Image (spheres, helix red, strand yellow):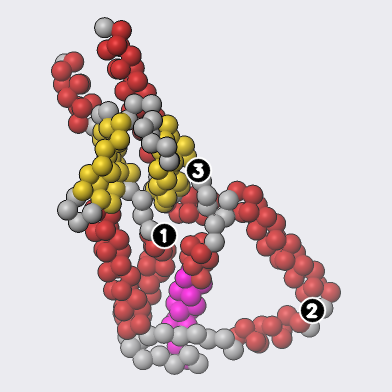
Amino acid sequence: MSENKESQSSRKRILLVPYPKFIFMYPTLIVSVIASVVLWLGGYETVNPAEDTTAVIMTGLFLAVLMANMFVIVFDFPRATSLTLMFIITSVAMGLWLLFLSKPDLLPALESWAKGIRPVANSTFFLCMTFGMGLMYIAVFVSTRFNYWELSNNELLHHHGMLSDLKRYPAPNLRVDKEINDVFEYALLGAGRLILHPATEKRAIVLDNILFVGTKEAEMTKMLGSIKVKIGSDSNG
């Protein structure tokens, strides 16, 4: 039984894959797929913004999600910045509410102006967007096969390059720090930054956009703890 446990622990490894920020664009891809299906089934190969309300709604939804997605990718929102942003949005919303209460004639004018904005795209556009973004996601997942880190037994391994070049670092005394630089990226995929401090290296190893970083950190802490206990017992023996 003990031999089986040792063999399982010897095979255990933790993969750390830094992804590009494009990985967080999946909400836009989901909306694009939904719009493609809805408009294709509805026969919206050609659309008229004045008549085809369904196409206008799907296009507006796509643009809203796309803008929000791009906003998350372009800017970083630490905890303090996120609280400030929420405070600003709440203040603006309260200010607009008070403005409309004091001047109710503004609301019909804004309503008529908003009704005049009718962005529209046909089913072919969304099919092309879905196909293009799908190819990009495939390229992202393929590229991660040529650049990832692995914590296994007593070593930290860096696999990189087309020919699977390998660089080794000793795992004992490895210190791991976790940072959440963007609360929205963390909300989307649990992503964050891991900072690794090998004992033999003067400079830290920074891995950005590690998915489900909390789980990865917990697994690494558990493995590194078991490595230290094992080394300690061997030295005492």
Residue 115 against residue 89 in the figure, above or below: below
Secondary structure type for disc 3: strand
Q: Are marks 1 and 2 in contact (CB under 8 Å)?
A: no
Q: Which residue is mark 3?
A: 179
Q: Is residue 235 left or right of residue 65?
A: left
Task: Identify the mark at residue 21; answer none if there is no mark.
Answer: 1
Secondary structure type for disc 2: loop
Around disc 2, counting alpha carbons within 10 Å, would you say few (fewer than 14), some (14 to 19), or many (20 or more)?
Answer: few
Q: Which residues are magenta?
A: 51-66
Mark 3–mark 2 Cα distance, whole angstroms, equals: 47 Å
* Residue 107 percent across, percent down from the top left: 73, 80
Q: Quadrant of residue 38?
A: bottom left
Which residue occupies 32% across, 48% down?
17
Task: Identify the mark at residue 104; answer none if there is no mark.
Answer: 2
Q: Nearer the viewer, residue 157 or 40?
A: 157
Q: Nearer the viewer, mark 1 or mark 2?
A: 1
Sequence order check, earlier mark of 1 and 2: 1
Mark 1–mark 3 Cα distance, whole angstroms, equals: 16 Å
The amino acid on which the numbered mark 3 sits, given as a three-letter code, is Glu
